[in-house]
Amino acid sequence: MQTQTLERMESEVRTYSRSFPVVFNKAVNARLSDEDGREYIDFLAGAGTLNYGHNNPHIKQALADYLMTDGIIHGLDFWTVAKREYLETLEEVILKPRGLDYKVHLPGPTGTNAVEAAIRLARVVKGRHNIVSFTNGFHGVTMGALAVTGNRKFREATGGVPTVGGAFMPFDGYMGDHTDTLDYFEKLLGDKSGGLDVPAAVIVETVQGEGGINVAGDKWLQRLEGICRDNDILLIIDDIQAGCGRTGKFFSFEHAGITPDIVTNSKSLSGFGLPFAHVLMRPELDKWKPGQYNGTFRGFNLAFVTAAAAMRKYWSDDTFERDVQRKGRIVEERFQKLARLISEKGHPASERGRGLMRGIDVGTGELADRITARAFENGLVIETSGQGGEVVKCLCPLTITDEDLIEGLDILERSVEEVLN
Amino acid sequence: MQTQTLERMESEVRTYSRSFPVVFNKAVNARLSDEDGREYIDFLAGAGTLNYGHNNPHIKQALADYLMTDGIIHGLDFWTVAKREYLETLEEVILKPRGLDYKVHLPGPTGTNAVEAAIRLARVVKGRHNIVSFTNGFHGVTMGALAVTGNRKFREATGGVPTVGGAFMPFDGYMGDHTDTLDYFEKLLGDKSGGLDVPAAVIVETVQGEGGINVAGDKWLQRLEGICRDNDILLIIDDIQAGCGRTGKFFSFEHAGITPDIVTNSKSLSGFGLPFAHVLMRPELDKWKPGQYNGTFRGFNLAFVTAAAAMRKYWSDDTFERDVQRKGRIVEERFQKLARLISEKGHPASERGRGLMRGIDVGTGELADRITARAFENGLVIETSGQGGEVVKCLCPLTITDEDLIEGLDILERSVEEVLN
Amino acid sequence: MQTQTLERMESEVRTYSRSFPVVFNKAVNARLSDEDGREYIDFLAGAGTLNYGHNNPHIKQALADYLMTDGIIHGLDFWTVAKREYLETLEEVILKPRGLDYKVHLPGPTGTNAVEAAIRLARVVKGRHNIVSFTNGFHGVTMGALAVTGNRKFREATGGVPTVGGAFMPFDGYMGDHTDTLDYFEKLLGDKSGGLDVPAAVIVETVQGEGGINVAGDKWLQRLEGICRDNDILLIIDDIQAGCGRTGKFFSFEHAGITPDIVTNSKSLSGFGLPFAHVLMRPELDKWKPGQYNGTFRGFNLAFVTAAAAMRKYWSDDTFERDVQRKGRIVEERFQKLARLISEKGHPASERGRGLMRGIDVGTGELADRITARAFENGLVIETSGQGGEVVKCLCPLTITDEDLIEGLDILERSVEEVLN
Amino acid sequence: MQTQTLERMESEVRTYSRSFPVVFNKAVNARLSDEDGREYIDFLAGAGTLNYGHNNPHIKQALADYLMTDGIIHGLDFWTVAKREYLETLEEVILKPRGLDYKVHLPGPTGTNAVEAAIRLARVVKGRHNIVSFTNGFHGVTMGALAVTGNRKFREATGGVPTVGGAFMPFDGYMGDHTDTLDYFEKLLGDKSGGLDVPAAVIVETVQGEGGINVAGDKWLQRLEGICRDNDILLIIDDIQAGCGRTGKFFSFEHAGITPDIVTNSKSLSGFGLPFAHVLMRPELDKWKPGQYNGTFRGFNLAFVTAAAAMRKYWSDDTFERDVQRKGRIVEERFQKLARLISEKGHPASERGRGLMRGIDVGTGELADRITARAFENGLVIETSGQGGEVVKCLCPLTITDEDLIEGLDILERSVEEVLN
């Protein structure tokens, strides 16, 4: 594999090509191939962007059909047939069956853009600057989103410019099993000199992906929703990684039965790996004035097409979500077994996650790196997350075949054994 | 045309669908069609995103071919064959022939992301927070980019959060014909109590697109480059709208013969309307550490494919750029004539621009709106820019046929006459 | 008493004249008189500014003597005899006997100025922007100090400008008796994605005055010092209200046996109510360059004179501090008794404090206000503090006579009874 | 003179003791003495703090009398007899005769505190964050005031924390004789994408003291007032250095006949070198709520006493201001002569200033330093200002005797000659 050009020309900022130093060239569903023809099972799937697999044939067909018609590809925020069909599909297939009533803001094709738009809207609506986010939350790296993102790696790479307008609270479980971290949040909200400016909004992931597959409990989320309601604070669910079926429901917050004021989606929203994002908001919050937020790629019609195709194909009934939940249980069991195995070898480990968003906390990033490196040698693309990279995570395509899923889990198990023996 | 769903579900933030309240469904090169089959000549072209026209067949073919092979669509920042070919093509077709030596950062698929990455890198490299931008400059609306973007519309929609780390200087010509605005900048740089924090970088568009097709003179840009060199300040050219051939050269700064330290490209970079952006930087500035800037869609392989195809097709020799310059002169002449016509009707107007990035300043946004509204009725999609929307601008595809170009100009002229009579 | 001019001309921002709507004209030690000749015992003492009483004769004599000599009154930061004597006295009487080695920064005559200078120095020394302060901490209201001050009253009166560079942690006891709040701080320090930027410094009051007479335990302070040392963070003790003997030691941190890197003093530092402040810092931290921090009144020589006189008079041996501790115990006992009394009346109340910095938490600001209002009618000036004003606090002069102290306490007790019956 | 303690214990931030490395011990009117008995004429006068001279006997008498009565020294913001008399005197002696109607905010005893309060009020009243100040303006160094202060020395000593909420415009004359700098300000105000956020207020010194004795012309100030009125922007005159008679009128803005919305005074306001400051505001702007701005020393009664004494003594009729103007003309003539002399020696120099706030721009800080160093050897305390310290400035007491004034000027002339020959 020729990598000189890549090494010479690409910025040192590159990361995944350090973990997986091969040149990939093909991919179908959960299988990646490199230029030398070697195949890998993909438990990363674009960090949750390829929930429907690589080159999903149904979605690709919709894309190809659209291309044949000379449909609009890029349309700023023009009205197009593709946009209309996207909105209709979103409403009919996703929102209405869930009893949700949202307007849609298409702020640009990336998650960070959606987050910037969501928190800006919250500030405008409430007339307050503060946005509360949570320890180990990740919401993007543009300066507005970075204010609510906890990672020092990014926060320390601003050239010294501090972020403005965010405050961090402890996520569910952060202070141990016996402390409900919302006690602290609620106490600060009621405290006139506690240092917490009354927030315009809370932004939270129900399962923190980059933060280490940390799952917020249903009761915790319900209480958080209640606190927001009681204190006139908007609740924003950042469902960029956990949404689009990853946890076994289209929206990850469905499990808790809560109704956010604002939702951000991206990653798997287009269904095909195309850059795409939207913000959903309760209609009465739509205080945007024309043109107050813009961006060139806020109308990427190919993504409208593929997103609508994905919704129709996978979310018209509950077949798909039940299948995801079933596979999630397979991973859960195998991960629990693996965690026990690792623990027995003297490295206390534990499983966690929801649906097909699962991880094993192996204690240290060093061990996790050794496992994932060995897994890659053995033909599995799998990554770590968590503040120290200590969580080996599974974000395989939701459409993965049972055979590939089992094979991937087998490879992981073998890799763990090789590393620990 | 069915627009109820669009009106009901899309946020009030929408803009272009207010100017052009139809549902578009097809487009080829410089021609758009709406759902009722009506055709429009497109002088907007995705605000400079569709330099090679809608559904460019050469580029579409490359995209279709790639789709057939089950190539990687989305790859985070994996090494892929498509990425390698993109980098090789960029180097061979664009950089080397121009004597440029840059490394490439792929920060995410939008211009604002590229600007955030560029200014952050400058801050890190220089250890200073201040970024100087210019009156009427537009560089994006995420909070970092907004600090260097002058538009009140966006700056006042942050919910009261002030931007941090930017300072504005007068653009070329801002203080009238007899003042070189760089005198002011240079004086402030040398003034220990003038209030200008020594900047890490200057960011500037050579032709301000959103700001009103304001052209920076070659001498002004050369002097600006000199001031930056003399004061250890990085020069960032934001070539997102003016780049990719729009001014008659691939990079708009080629006219002035300057060499920026950092360049941002997006919009027409993918050649097909796909979200895509990169940052070019002198190799010694690549102080990024692995993973210090990230984003899900920083490796959109379809865009690598189309961008490389566009470069090979249009930039392997100077045929295309000479053709753009030729068409630019056609627009220039017709716009000068139109400006005289409008002036004669009592509305002092003037033409300006470079290549196929041209505008007529008609004095007021109200008049400009009447002209563009009438043009739309007459079958031409054309927009305004400038601080008050007073500039009618032409951003037609660079690949527009002479027939469509002339027809578009004729429609515009007729529309002006109808409005003024 | 004529108050029309005062009411007409003074800004609505006025506060104490609302609680005590009389015109005071004379004061000696712990006794205030109003224009009508009515006397009050003063349990407020300039919110801790008059530790040595009103018009302390020893200190006044030093001031009068100095005035007779035509000594320098105002000297910018000139070297003067008075400044030298102040520094010598500070070194000989205060620092050396306590084994402390500090350099002195005279940043201006107010506490907020001292805090701004202290946190700025910490940022310069450590090259980090973040300063950690604590819930209910009060450090001043200029914008730099406000970033570490928790009160919404001030934070919401900035016209929407958010503060920059501060983060709040829970003070000792904030999360209940069974939680060591430093667990949370320490966890966040070690967490790479917890949202806590590594701080340059921690700033803390050992007893929070405005925050409600909240006392940090010795062990908590020792652990905090240890955390700072282990993490290369500077420890700033803001001893503006708790210092100068208020807690029974010159520095309030002496009780815990810790050695801060930086100390701020003001309020009673001049000993006579004159505006005065200094910052003490370990010599190796003195990274200031000439003139990097300035202010017109950074050399108020009358304050040098009175401050030195106060130190010589009261701190040359331990007689005074033992007397303060003795009186503190008197107040403690009476306050405990009062707290029991109030509790018995159905308002759960508790006593807390150290030395002569003591309070009774009566549960609500409403009840506290009724008590202090009645006390004022009965001849006692006493105020509340705490986030909701729920703490009735005693900050009487340390020099108060036993007779006045007892009388004041009697008045308070009588007032409580009147209010509750 | 013993200086070891001073050198060892005082922070490296010290400045004036570097220019004047002696220990001062006495001072009367315009004469300073050092510990060795050497006398100096004082052309610095506390950088404008001692307009009525050192140890002014009238004012001292009022202070001594007050001390004899055991009057309130420190009173937080209590109503006191001294405060009432101060307000009455201010109203009767200063405001009413000038047709001014202001309410008074006593925010704390320093200029920077007054500026923080003034700009915060402006933000609250207008609901906008931006405050426009001018090149070479100096308004204080606490973080809020620093946002409107241009000096890099201070701005670069924040440990990297950028200031928020200020924008700088060119002061009168900054762009040369042929450009009215307000053209630029006005153009930006009217420009929707010029990058200037609509300001809540403009803050300006009519004569910039620290900035180099730069005088704003009357017409420029009048136009500035008009621009503010037309654009709903508050006009704040920072009269901290130029006020209290320094320019020959009590308020420096009287010359231009303008009426600011808000005025800040400090420095010579107390008349005796005591820390003191107030903010004056049009009554309808007093939107402060009780306690929204506080500070321990906001009621320094000794300063009320001396300030009232100074006003009654010097401002009850126009004798004093005519005398200041007369002396100003003396300095003006001698400075013009000196400027010619210096120019003839090959160092282009010029005189400028108003009243007894005057300077000679000698072109470089290096030459200015040599002149002032030689002057000090010759018995004259005189300092420089300006962005590079290139302006030798006279801020002698307004009460200086003609003999001392002439002698001081003679020393300066001799020193210039010695330096240049």
Image (tube, coloured by chain):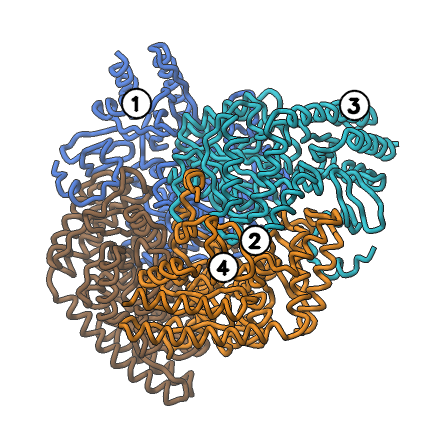
Chain colours: A brown, B blue, C orange, D cyan
User: Within 10 Å of the Cα at label 2, are there few (<14), some (14-19), or many (20+) other Cα atoms?
Assistant: many
The disc labelled 4 sits on which kind of residue? Ala
User: Few, some or many C-alpha atoms within 10 Å of disc 4 (few <14, some 14-19, many ≥20)?
Assistant: many
Q: Residue A35, relative to residue D415: is it above or below? A: below
Residue with the mark numbered 4 = C47
The answer to the question of whether label 3 and label 2 lie on touching residues, with beta carbons closer than 8 A, is: no
Q: Name the residue under label 3.
A: D337
Q: Is residue A204 left or right of residue A166?
A: left
Position of residue C2 measured from the top left corner of the image (x, y, whole percent) = 44, 42
Disc 2 sits on a residue from what chain?
Answer: C
Task: Give residue B403's position: percent from left, percent from top.
Answer: 30, 24
Tell me the residue that label 2 is attached to: C110
Identify the element where label 2 is drawn: loop
Marks 4 and 1, how far apart at CA: 61 Å
Q: Which of marks 4 and 1 is in front?
A: 4
Q: Mark 1 lies on which chain?
A: B
Task: Find the distance from the CA under tag 2 to the CA under tag 4.
Answer: 14 Å
Mark 2 and mark 1: Cα distance apart in space: 55 Å
Whether residue A126 is visible, yes or no, is yes
Chain assignment, label 3: D
**Quadrant of the image containing the C terminus of chain B:** top left
